[in-house]
Amino acid sequence: MGATKRSILIMFCALMLFRHVEASSSSPSPQKNQSQGSLDSFLYNYALNSIPKPRTGQVYEVSSPANFSGVGVSLLRLRAHSLWKNGANLSSIEIPPKAALPFPFTRRVDLVKQDLGNWSTSYYNIVPNYTLVAPVVGLLVYNSDAGPTSTRLVGLEMRGDSVITVSFRNVSLNQYDAASLRCVRFAADGTLQLSNVSGGGSTCVWRSDGHFSIFAPLNMKKNKKKGKESEVKWWMIGIPGGVAAAAVLVAGGGILWWWRSVRKMERIAERSEGLNSIWIGSSRMPTATGIRTQPNLENSYIP
Ligand SMILES: *[C@@H]1O[C@H](CO)[C@@H](O)[C@H](O)[C@H]1NC(C)=O
Ligand SMILES: *[C@@H]1O[C@H](CO)[C@@H](O)[C@H](O)[C@H]1NC(C)=O
Ligand SMILES: *[C@@H]1O[C@H](CO)[C@@H](O)[C@H](O)[C@H]1NC(C)=O
Ligand SMILES: *[C@@H]1O[C@H](CO)[C@@H](O)[C@H](O)[C@H]1NC(C)=O
Ligand SMILES: *[C@@H]1O[C@H](CO)[C@@H](O)[C@H](O)[C@H]1NC(C)=O
Ligand SMILES: *[C@@H]1O[C@H](CO)[C@@H](O)[C@H](O)[C@H]1NC(C)=O
Ligand SMILES: *[C@@H]1O[C@H](CO)[C@@H](O)[C@H](O)[C@H]1NC(C)=O
């Protein structure tokens, strides 16, 4: 009876270990899209607090919020008329003249450019089979005049075939095949658009505001060192954890099996004299197979 209890306990522990491994493999995945909107309004409020009276037409580079070190925020307040007539230049995001008006229309707008830097993957999902190779930058348009900041978000309406140009000049993309790179736009409604890169492989053109970045297919990175960190972590936790859990399960199962077989054999032994053949049988028990396979798993998978 003690043996059964012990093996049940061992299996329970193995299950808990599996759960733990599962939890640690899913936690780094950046499923945080419900917080994207609150990050946007946090950064807008932060910019307005840093620059309480922005002068129209001047681009302000706001220093990173204390708890978002590495995030870049720029603020540009414009009259709609000026946005239309002259366009806007937020360095890496350019709106050409005679291209855009706020929609719904407002007389003045605040254009906010975000560069999420190393926070990008914490807020924006990776598309299956693709990996982010550039930071996420955002262009958000607010009505600068009315109401609480949380209700000021408007958009841009683009005329004809004019486009917003988003360039990732500072991002080194040489290691990727330019034809495999994809521009990505994360729209406010949670949908996602892909398009080809242009401008020698570091520029994206879009017909709307939103959040933008560049993806590369995951298999392009097979031999590159710069793998996604959370994945590396997953494998580092996942493989030894999985192997350990499997080992515990096999051992637990083996012990249970062994105990049952021993009981069975005892019962048979009580009834018959065929001791030899029974002991030959016991040497073929799965306990042995389980123990023999274990070191193989470890040797071939541990990095
Ligand atoms: C940063 O601080 C603001 C409030 O000051 C808070 O709303 C936000 O969640 C914080 N972000 C992080 C990542 O800690
Ligand atoms: C926009 O600004 C960047 C640098 O701030 C500059 O390199 C670029 O030429 C400007 N674009 C236009 C169209 O003026
Ligand atoms: C981004 O980098 C800054 C240092 O430049 C660091 O303080 C911050 O914690 C990093 N953010 C994340 C999400 O790793
Ligand atoms: C990802 O790639 C694998 C094989 O390369 C394929 O089976 C799978 O369908 C792909 N997933 C998506 C969402 O494209
Ligand atoms: C991009 O590079 C230029 C010069 O090479 C530098 O002045 C600028 O700060 C960089 N921008 C970012 C976001 O790193
Ligand atoms: C969040 O992401 C899920 C899929 O990952 C999507 O179905 C949902 O619409 C998104 N929600 C928002 C508010 O973006
Ligand atoms: C993207 O480029 C590929 C060739 O590199 C081309 O076949 C495809 O039509 C392009 N897609 C768009 C939307 O331009």
Image: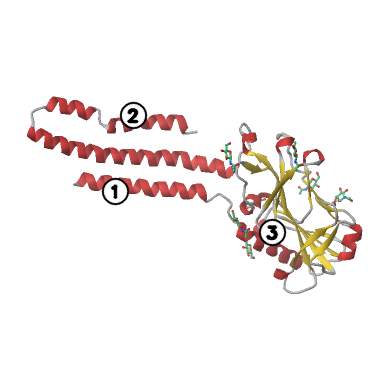
The amino acid type of the residue labelled 2 equals Arg
Q: Position of residue 238 (x, y in %)?
A: 47, 42
Label 3 and label 1: CA atoms lie apart by: 49 Å
Observer-side mark, 3 or 1, equals: 3
The amino acid type of the residue labelled 3 equals Ala
Q: Which residue is mark 1?
A: 9
Q: Which mark is residue 292?
A: 2
Residue extending furthest right?
A: 85
- In the image, residue 203 sits, relative to residue 62, either above or below, namely above
Left or right: 226 as drawn, with respect to 5: right
> Is ligand 6 closer than 8 angstroms to the Cβ of mark 3?
yes
Quick one: label 3 or label 1, which is nearer the N terminus? 1
Quick one: label 2 or label 1, which is nearer the N terminus? 1
Q: Which mark is residue 188?
A: 3
Label 3 and label 2: CA atoms lie apart by: 54 Å
- Please, what secondary structure does the residue beneath circle 2 have? helix
Label 2 and label 1: CA atoms lie apart by: 23 Å
- In the image, residue 222 sits, relative to residue 158, either above or below, namely above
Report the front residue among 140 and 291: 140
**Residue shown at 40%/29% (left/top)?**
296
